[in-house]
Image (tube, helix red, strand yellow):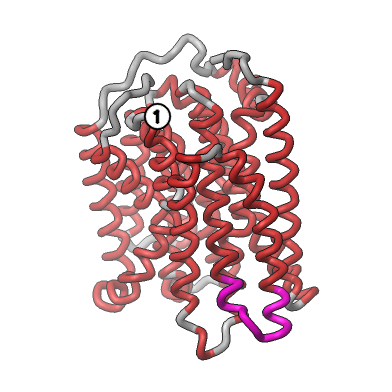
């Protein structure tokens, strides 16, 4: 997909909206978790699997989707994913048995993955180079924005209209977005000769993780998602009754960080920025633990931790166009980001839960330090590779 010298902001906002609606495939079940558990008569563990199975699909097929995207066509892939999501949300509005509901969630994983691979690649292609980091920063807020929007009006909507109406509304919004995207986005270009064929899929999968330019954004994003959901779950536990207002501010600070990363990486290399952010992230985790023990400054430390983690997540997204200028490479990098992001979101919460149970206040700082240290090592490696590759052309 060729790049442009003009930024089409309406398309950028439309693609961002598609991402938000895809993220609501997680947010809607999270919001209605207790109601759905009661409706189906299942345990919290079973309902938890129904929530997380969407991410498991991305974990297992993320890179494969990124490899196949150029051959399918990004516009077709995006609109097909949105239409599939709309159909599944409409089916979920019916009175389904639990096992059928879980089946629709598995298919929603494919819908979600199609959108998160195609939309950022299309966004990069419809954005001028001078605005690309800003657009990627905006894109990286799609999950947090979906959860914030769902939390803002979702409880009132559920109380007034019920769970089936929430699923039906999601289906309608997905359908409208799919039609708008089909009309507004340019036609897909013929697939390049290097587009993935089935026989070479495994080899190209390996190539994604052996090429530092396509692997590094996903690996850095893992260090972010390994803590993002867990921090939103465990940070509020340290709040006192008088500080409960901060539970609403924390996700907003994460969104502010991810969007702010787009502006910062417009002026500085995202790799250079990440090399500063990961040590700051570890320090913020230590400050949170110290504040929890002393009872002083916990809200400020928690807000700083969420802001810095959001900056790290947005900067990891900005690495994709910074390191990969070919759309096929960007799709591979987006696939790795989807896969590694789902891996982090799957492993992070149980790691934090175990650590906080074992070590009380310091239990939150230990995983943060572990992930921040991993990110620091990765970015140091990336800097070395970038210096060694200076002046060498990228291979398509």
Q: Which residue is nearer to you in this view: 51 or 102?
A: 51
User: At 39% from the left edge and 58% from the top edge, which residue is drawn?
Assistant: 145
| Mark 1 lies on residue | 129
**On screen, 277 above or below 377?**
below
Q: Which residue is nearer to you in this view: 92 or 114?
A: 114
Answer with left or right where residue 192 lies relative to residue 305.
Answer: left
User: At 49% from the left edge and 61% from the top edge, which residue is drawn?
Assistant: 254
Q: Residue furthest right?
A: 358
Q: Residue furthest bottom?
A: 241
| Residue 229 on image: x %, y % | 56, 61
Mark 1 lies on a secondary structure that is helix
User: Is most of the magenta stretch helix, strand or loop?
Assistant: helix
Q: Is residue 60 visible?
A: no
| Residue 317 on image: x %, y % | 51, 41
**On screen, 389 above or below 181?**
above
Q: Is residue 300 magenta?
A: yes
Q: Is residue 209 visible?
A: yes
Q: Which residue is nearer to you in this view: 208 or 31?
A: 208
| Quarter of the image where one finds residue 124 | top left
User: At 73% from the left edge and 73% from the top edge, which residue is drawn?
Assistant: 356
| Residue 207 on image: x %, y % | 65, 23
Q: Is residue 252 magenta?
A: no
| Quarter of the image where one finds residue 169 | bottom left
Give the residues drawn in magenta, as a range. 289-302
User: At 60% from the left edge and 16% from the top edge, which residue is drawn?
Assistant: 200
């Amino acid at each position: 997909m060729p790049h442009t010298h003009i930024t089409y902001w309406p398309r950028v906002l439309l693609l961002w909206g598609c991402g938000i609606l895809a993220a609501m495939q997680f947010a809607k079940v999270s919001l209605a978790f207790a109601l759905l558990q009661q409706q189906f008569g299942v345990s919290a563990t079973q309902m938890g699997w129904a929530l997380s199975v969407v991410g498991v699909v991305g974990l297992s097929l993320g890179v494969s989707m990124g490899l196949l995207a150029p051959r399918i066509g990004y516009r077709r892939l995006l609109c097909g994913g949105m239409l599939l999501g709309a159909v599944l949300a409409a089916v979920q509005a019916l009175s389904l048995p639990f096992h059928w509901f879980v089946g629709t969630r598995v298919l929603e994983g494919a819908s979600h993955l199609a959108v998160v691979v195609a939309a950022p690649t299309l966004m990069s292609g419809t954005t001028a180079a001078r605005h690309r980091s800003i657009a990627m920063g905006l894109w990286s807020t799609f999950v947090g924005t979906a959860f914030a929007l769902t939390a803002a009006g979702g409880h009132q909507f559920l109380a007034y209209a019920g769970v089936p109406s929430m699923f039906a509304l999601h289906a309608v919004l997905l359908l409208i977005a799919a039609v708008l995207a089909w009309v507004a986005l340019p036609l897909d270009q013929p697939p390049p000769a290097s587009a993935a064929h089935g026989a070479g899929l495994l080899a190209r999968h390996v190539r994604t993780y052996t090429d530092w330019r396509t692997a590094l954004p996903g690996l850095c994003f893992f260090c972010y998602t390994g803590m993002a959901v867990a921090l939103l779950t465990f940070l509020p536990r340290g709040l006192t009754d008088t500080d409960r207002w901060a539970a609403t501010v924390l996700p907003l600070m994460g969104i502010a960080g991810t969007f702010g990363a787009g502006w910062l990486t417009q002026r500085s290399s995202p790799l250079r920025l990440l090399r500063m952010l990961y040590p700051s992230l570890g320090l913020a985790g230590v400050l949170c633990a110290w504040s929890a023990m002393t009872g002083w400054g916990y809200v400020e430390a928690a807000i700083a931790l969420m802001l810095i983690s959001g900056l790290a997540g947005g900067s990891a997204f900005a690495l994709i166009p910074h390191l990969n200028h070919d759309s096929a490479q960007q799709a591979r990098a987006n696939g790795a980001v989807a896969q590694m992001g789902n891996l982090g979101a799957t492993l992070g919460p149980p790691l934090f839960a175990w650590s906080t149970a074992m070590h009380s206040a310091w239990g939150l700082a230990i995983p943060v330090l572990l992930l921040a240290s991993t990110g620091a090592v990765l970015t140091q490696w990336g800097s070395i590779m970038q210096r060694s590759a200076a002046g060498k052309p990228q291979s398509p």
